[in-house]
């Protein structure tokens, strides 16, 4: 008994493996910013440029965080990558761009008009995107809930194509400029030489309250409890009297609502919309969700911010034409080092 | 009690009478179909657009049969198959055109090529050599892409392969900016063109306007790939793939080496993609980065799903049907409809929507495909019958 309780020193191989799987991903993530920080310090003498990247990255990343939560919620509850989620986000942008033109909000109006106009647009975007997402679930995923896993994944890709085509027919095939309502590039304050722009304030100002409401809804409310129960074990949840179908619909609604909000922010922040923003944006946000650990809300937010930062660094230093490749390379690296993500638990699929 | 009996009887009645084919029908069909296909060019002009579409379709058949090994047999959902098409096509671009013009002081390198190509600058290899190189390069890429997915399952594999497909697509687009010894890596969106047409011993150089040799060459490729596919499926390796698809844990417990078997599936599937890419690159006479986009992966996936995952003849049928929808039905037939109705609308705009709709409808109405594989069909039917109990566990 004595001998058995003494922990034998693990051989080097497995120990190294454990270290890599625990810290490998963090090391990979830190490599780029640390290198750039040293580079900045040695050439410019301060970290202003990296700071600018960080600020832009956080506001960009908060958009991806909102979209990533949609992926994470849906994956947590039905174990399906909702490929069409990026398109829901794209349609949110399109609705926003069309609606504030319709209600007559345009550049140079008073702050109050602008605020209420945009608040109204935000609500509408969220409603439309949420309903689209619920509809997708109803049409394409629910009939296949008992089918092998491959089937709903394929319909998800199919729905994504259909919605992309809707976007293409609606706004045409090339990127479209949107009225710069909030004067996104205007510098509001400068902290340590790093300018903070209107767009950054908007992105963070909309995202943070939404995230707080969402997390408290999921952790406090009765419906949130039902969602968590269904995610853990759908059958047991059903036995406890939870309406699983409604709960799943609700999950898709929440995901869609956040994607709609992200769509509005994206349109105001980037001032261009495009039918393919959903495909690339969706993949970026999915990478964020996986990076944080899929199924984990805090992880999705963290992943979104990290990915936003990485994107900004790559846009600024390497060239924006390479940014998608770099984001995907990170996705692959995460899969190699830690498929369960930064904050995630071990899941069956990611083993 | 009585209601269950009634529903059982109802389902009994709705079942169609099954035709029992002898077990060798699948292989027996091959010579018939190939001979019938060989007769097709006799009814058309040497330059007819129909023949052009046929050749394209045969290229897609090769590609779909390759993807079928990965997705249909081994059950590894690959959403980045376009990567291997790209690698095959760039092999032709690099080794069969004037693209690398500066090599050997502008005199070029020529191996087993005759006629005009032997005097041009750039690398010009015999097309059969290019096919072999394309196969090897694609297979190596397949293994490299497969390696990170070995620990993963299901959706995660899909997303990693998708990421790789996108990375290779990005490299193709931005490759004109990558310089190696003063030579750009790809020609980006401008494309590498012209590409050497196929030049075979005894047959000579293929003409771009005479499509018949191209057709027969593609048909021979399809015949070889079909043969390999049948032999692989019935081999020890093929059974190991199917075992891994059905239940990985059980298969590993029975002694199937999961890592090796999966990598073999990736490599074989990728090699077929490389062959198809090399052929289509030469046939289309251009290697352009815009050809290698995500929707090609989905098109090929749609082919094998339409036909029936894992079913060889189903995949052939699916590839031909979807390829003709892509190259003939949408641009030529559907595009005329709005004009006749007096509406000004370009129907080629809704190509993606049609594919998406096809994928969704296929999965909901006939998930087993047009010509389902027997084993796969059983699996789907079982799930459907016990839907309530296996509501959530079946997906895992």
Image: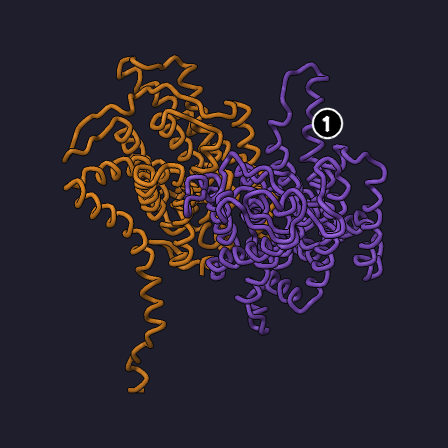
Badge 1 crowding class, 10 Å Cα cut-off, few under 14, some 14 to 19, many 20 or more, is few
Frontmost residue, A56 versus B356:
A56
Using the image as rendered, state which of residue A295 and residue B105 is in the foreground. B105
Callout 1 secondary element: helix
Say which quarter of the image contains residue A337. Answer: bottom left
Q: Residue at x 80, y 59 (%)?
A: B27
Q: Is residue B338 above or below residue B385?
A: above
The residue to which callout 1 is attached is B333
The one nearer the camera, B97 or B33, is B97
- Side of A274 where A45 appears, left or right: left
In the depicted structure, whether residue B63 falls above or below residue B361: below
User: Which residue is rendered at x = 32% and y = 71% of the image?
Assistant: A15
Does the rendering let one see residue B100? yes
Chain bearing mark 1 = B
Please provide percent x and percent y for residue A69: 39, 42
Q: Position of residue A309 (x, y in %)?
A: 30, 41
Is there any visible trace of residue B364 in the rendered image?
Answer: no
Per the rendering, the colour in which chain A appears is orange
């Amino acid at each position: 008994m004595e001998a058995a309780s003494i922990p034998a020193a693990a051989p080097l191989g497995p120990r190294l493996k454990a270290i890599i799987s625990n810290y490998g991903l963090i090391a990979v993530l830190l490599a780029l910013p640390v290198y750039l920080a040293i580079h900045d310090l040695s050439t410019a003498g301060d970290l202003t440029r990296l700071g600018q990247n960080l600020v832009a990255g956080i506001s960009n990343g908060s958009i991806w965080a909102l979209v990533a939560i949609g992926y994470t919620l849906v994956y947590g509850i039905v174990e399906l990558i909702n490929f069409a989620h990026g398109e829901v986000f794209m349609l949110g942008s399109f609705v926003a761009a069309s609606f504030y033109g319709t209600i007559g909000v345009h550049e140079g109006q008073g702050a109050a008009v602008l605020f209420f106009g945009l608040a109204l647009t935000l609500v509408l975007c969220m409603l439309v995107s949420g309903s689209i997402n619920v509809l997708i679930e109803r049409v394409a995923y629910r009939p296949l809930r008992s089918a092998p896993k491959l089937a709903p994944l394929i319909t998800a890709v199919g729905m994504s194509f259909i919605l992309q085509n809707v976007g293409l027919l609606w706004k045409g095939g090339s990127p479209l400029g949107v009225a710069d309502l909030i004067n996104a590039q205007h510098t509001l304050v400068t902290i340590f030489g790093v300018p903070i722009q209107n767009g950054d304030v908007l992105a963070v100002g909309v995202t943070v309250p939404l995230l707080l409401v969402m997390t408290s809804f999921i952790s406090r409310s009765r419906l949130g409890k039902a969602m968590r129960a269904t995610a853990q074990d759908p059958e047991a949840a059903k036995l406890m009297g939870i309406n699983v179908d409604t709960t799943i619909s609700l999950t898709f609604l929440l995901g869609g609502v956040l994607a709609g909000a992200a769509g509005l922010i994206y349109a105001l922040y980037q001032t261009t919309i495009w039918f393919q923003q959903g495909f690339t944006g969706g993949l970026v946000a999915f990478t964020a969700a996986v990076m944080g650990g899929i199924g984990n809300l805090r992880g999705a937010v963290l992943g979104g911010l990290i990915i936003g930062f990485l994107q900004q660094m790559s846009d600024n230093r390497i060239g924006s034409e390479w940014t998608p490749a770099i984001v995907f390379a990170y996705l692959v690296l995460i899969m190699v080092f830690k498929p369960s993500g930064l904050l995630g638990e071990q899941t069956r699929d990611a083993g | 009690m009585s209601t269950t009996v009634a529903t059982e009887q109802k389902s009994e009645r709705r079942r169609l009478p099954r035709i029992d084919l002898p077990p060798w029908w699948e292989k027996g069909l091959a010579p018939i179909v190939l001979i019938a296909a060989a007769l097709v060019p006799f009814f058309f002009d040497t330059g007819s657009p129909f023949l052009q579409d046929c050749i394209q379709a045969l290229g897609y058949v090769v590609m779909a049969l390759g993807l079928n090994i990965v997705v249909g047999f081994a059950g590894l959902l690959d959403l980045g198959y376009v990567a291997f098409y790209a690698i095959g096509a760039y092999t032709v671009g690099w080794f069969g055109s004037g693209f690398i013009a500066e090599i050997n002081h502008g005199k070029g390198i020529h191996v087993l090529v005759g006629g005009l190509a032997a005097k041009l600058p750039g690398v010009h290899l015999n097309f059969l050599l290019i096919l072999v190189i394309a196969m090897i390069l694609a297979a190596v890429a397949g293994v490299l892409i497969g390696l990170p997915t070995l620990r993963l399952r299901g959706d995660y594999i899909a997303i990693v392969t998708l990421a790789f497909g996108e990375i290779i697509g990005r490299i193709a687009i931005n490759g004109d900016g990558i310089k190696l010894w003063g030579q750009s890596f790809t020609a980006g969106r401008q494309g590498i063109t012209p590409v050497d047409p196929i030049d075979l011993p005894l047959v000579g150089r293929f003409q771009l306007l005479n499509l018949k040799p191209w057709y027969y060459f593609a048909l021979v490729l399809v015949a070889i790939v079909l043969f390999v596919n049948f032999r692989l499926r019935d081999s020890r390796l093929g059974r190991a793939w199917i075992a891994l698809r059905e239940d990985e844990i059980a298969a590993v417990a029975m002694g199937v080496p999961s890592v090796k078997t999966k990598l073999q599936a990736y490599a074989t599937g990728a090699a077929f993609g490389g062959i198809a890419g090399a052929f289509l690159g030469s046939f289309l006479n251009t290697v352009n980065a815009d050809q290698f986009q995500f929707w090609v992966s989905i098109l090929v996936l749609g082919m094998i799903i339409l036909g029936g995952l894992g079913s060889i003849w189903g995949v052939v049928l699916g590839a031909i049907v979807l390829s003709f929808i892509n190259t003939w039905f949408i641009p030529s037939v559907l595009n005329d409809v709005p004009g006749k109705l007096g509406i000004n609308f370009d129907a080629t705009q809704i190509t993606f929507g049609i594919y998406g709709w096809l994928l969704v409808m296929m999965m909901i109405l006939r998930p087993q495909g047009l010509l389902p594989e027997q084993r796969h069909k059983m699996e789907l039917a079982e799930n459907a019958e016990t839907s309530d109990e296996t509501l959530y566990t079946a997906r895992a």
